[in-house]
Amino acid sequence: MADHQGRGRPALAGITLGCDYNPEQWSPSVWLEDVALMTVAGIDLVAINIFGWSDLESQPGRYDFDRLDAVIELLHANGIAINLGTATASPPPWLSAQHPEILPVAADGTRRFPGGRQAWCPSSPVYRRHALALVEQVAKRYGRHPGVVLWHVSNELGCHNALCYCDVSAEAFRAWLRQRYGTIAALNSAWGTAFWSQRYHDWAEIQPPRATLSAGNPTQILDFHRFSSDALLDCHQAEAEVLRRHSDAPVTTNFMVTAHIRNLDYWSWAPHVDIVANDHYLDHRLDDPTAELSFAADLTRGLSGGEPWMLMEQAAGAVNWQPYNLAKTPGQMLRNSLTHVARGADSISFFQWRAAPYGAEKFHSALVPHAGTDTVAWREVLHLSAVLKRLREVAGTRVLADTALVFSWPSWWAADGDGRPSEAVRYLDQVHAVYNELRKLGVTVDVVAPGADLSAYRLVAIPCLYAVSDADATRINEYVAGGGHAVVTFFSGIADEKDHIRLGGYPGAFRDMLGISVEEFFPSEPGRTFGLSTGGRAGLWAENLRLTTATALTRYTDGPLPGVPAVTRNTYGDGTGWYIATALDTTTLRDVLRQAVETAWVPATGPEGDGSVEVVRRADGERRYLFAINHGTTTVELPATGHELVDDQPITGTLRVGAGQVRVVREDRAR
Ligand code: GLA
Ligand code: GLA
């Protein structure tokens, strides 16, 4: 639970609109224009001072707050609330010039230079001392300012600098390991150092998993991920402690719940922020970027324990850091924004306010593009603002979901480790595969931590949960025994939290619950597929699965294991465990999930389809809102009765959602 009480959420009403703002890049005459335009656009909340360090502290201990004072007064005088950055994300050049030892070191021992951002070692006491001195100044000066409604610690902690292998980090890693294991014997046993003559006799012999000739020790690598996540959390906590001493405003930091960054175990972070905030960018390197947005939003809501959360950054148009930076199509920014709202966000913010004319992100989109305000982009911002104001009453409600999906960062780290049966089996791909088909079935999913209380859910999906502790596995098995329904997919329950294989037949943790036992994995080359007795195809993976108490739902007709079950179902206690032993084609996967959904009596929120129509509900005791988002190219009709808020009109029985449109209905209770 939260380690701080009573701060709650920023004092803002409705569904707020916000942005990052970097006034240090602009002259004061532009600030005036900015604030005037922010007022036109109905901007509620502005994040400033995120990269302000070199501006605020030109020499060690010499602070100049004139510019920041002026910006804060200007925003406040215009009724724009401030999300104040601590300015520690990117240290000034003088700090690394005086203290090159704060610069991070890569696994091969080479140090990274300054010149980008986040060039600091998370374990560096020198960095920490200078950063906290700055935070102390900022917090003291602005901690009671009525315009400051929220604190923004650093920025995307661990985006670039999560894994540092320097000697200082090595020492901190050893201290962390002593805490975790107590004795060197316990560490030797956890790390399996009997293998390859790695037994340690002294803590001083232990190193971070630096570049090696052969494969490294998997548990050492896994623990280094855990340590690195904790080291950055400690940086967050140190800043938060200073802020909380000088201010009652809530404290947060922007998480990166996204497909391309996996450095932090946010389940362990979430209790330490007053409100959960996430940055999300569409990733066009994925097969279905829109579905990934929904997944990330559901996972962020999970981190928030179901409470409303903040989208701290997204792009108005294209980003500039993917190989091909796709612009948004008309209406897409609104759909993306309202997908976050539908899935629990009460605040929609952007990186950034005004597109920069210089710097590494000069081609990144912004609310005010290079071309100015006589633009499609700007008109879309005004439209979004108007829509968010009409959705005001939705704020504070919670998303309704009867299905959970178990997600684990340590399992991600371990499952994608070196020396696994197939490098084509990647944790997040398998999670997305299951999530995407549930989404196409119209099922709203809560993403939960391993070990979460599952009793409220009718169905639980457990994709590729490779490493799972005894306690967390027991929780899942007891949920099923007590009448729950679980769908487990291959490469789950294989190892414990130390990444030691569970012996006696795979998938050790769930063998009894699933009523199967597996002797050997048969991964196959990507692209090769095999037939199934019920039609459809599978690929990537097969297992010589033996039924103990389960029944086979489909079997391979060819491939490495003809006749062997590919999907099974087992009665366990009062519940049911399904097992999917291979990568099914999407239609077949959806068929299996549909059976589970029907057996578990999960009510779909929306119609089954290709995922282009999303329907999600938010509710509280009194009110219920249906969000319908049509990413497709044809109009759809849905049953609904109530009042539509985007267009402000009554709906009597049928809701039409045009191509590309979003509709939000306050549903009548009595039907
Ligand atoms: C991140 C950062 C921002 C900016 C954007 C660009 O989310 O927090 O400072 O770099 O990405 O997409
Ligand atoms: C990372 C972040 C992005 C963006 C880029 C910029 O990939 O996730 O949001 O900030 O760095 O390089």
Image (cartoon, grey):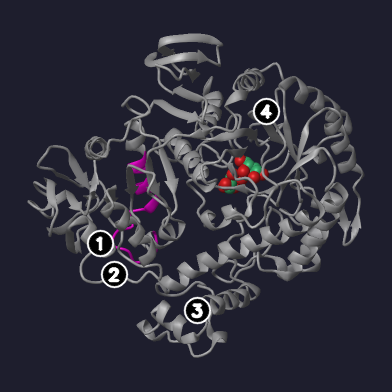
Describe the element under mark 4 as helix, strand or loop. loop
Tag 1–tag 3 contact (CB < 8 Å): no
Q: Amino acid at mark 3?
A: Tyr
Q: Is residue 202 above or below residue 523?
A: below
Percent position of residue 198, x then y = 42, 84
Tag 2–tag 1 contact (CB < 8 Å): yes
Q: How far is disc 3 from disc 2 in space, using C-alphas?
A: 21 Å
Q: Amino acid at mark 4?
A: Leu
Q: Is residue 599 above or below residue 542?
A: above
Percent position of residue 646, x then y = 55, 16
Tag 4–tag 3 contact (CB < 8 Å): no
Q: What residue is pinned by disc 3?
A: 181
Q: Amino acid at mark 2?
A: Arg
Q: Is residue 188 above or below residue 332?
A: below
Describe the element under mark 2 as helix, strand or loop. loop
Q: Which mark is on residue 367? A: 4
Dot 3 crowding, Cα within 10 Å, few <14, some 14–19, many 20+: some
Q: What residue is pinned by disc 2?
A: 502
Q: Is residue 514 above or below residue 339?
A: below
Tag 4–tag 1 contact (CB < 8 Å): no
The stretch in magenta equals 416-435
Nearest to viewer (mark 4 / mark 1):
1
Q: How far is disc 1 from disc 3 in space, using C-alphas?
A: 27 Å
> Which residue is nearer to you in this view: 305 or 167?
305
The answer to whether the residue bearing label 3 lies less than 8 angstroms from the nearest atom of ligand 2 is: no
Residue 346 lies in quadrant: top right
Dot 3 or dot 2: first in sequence order is 3
Q: What residue is pinned by disc 1?
A: 507
Describe the element under mark 3 as helix, strand or loop. helix
Q: How far is disc 2 from disc 1 in space, using C-alphas?
A: 8 Å
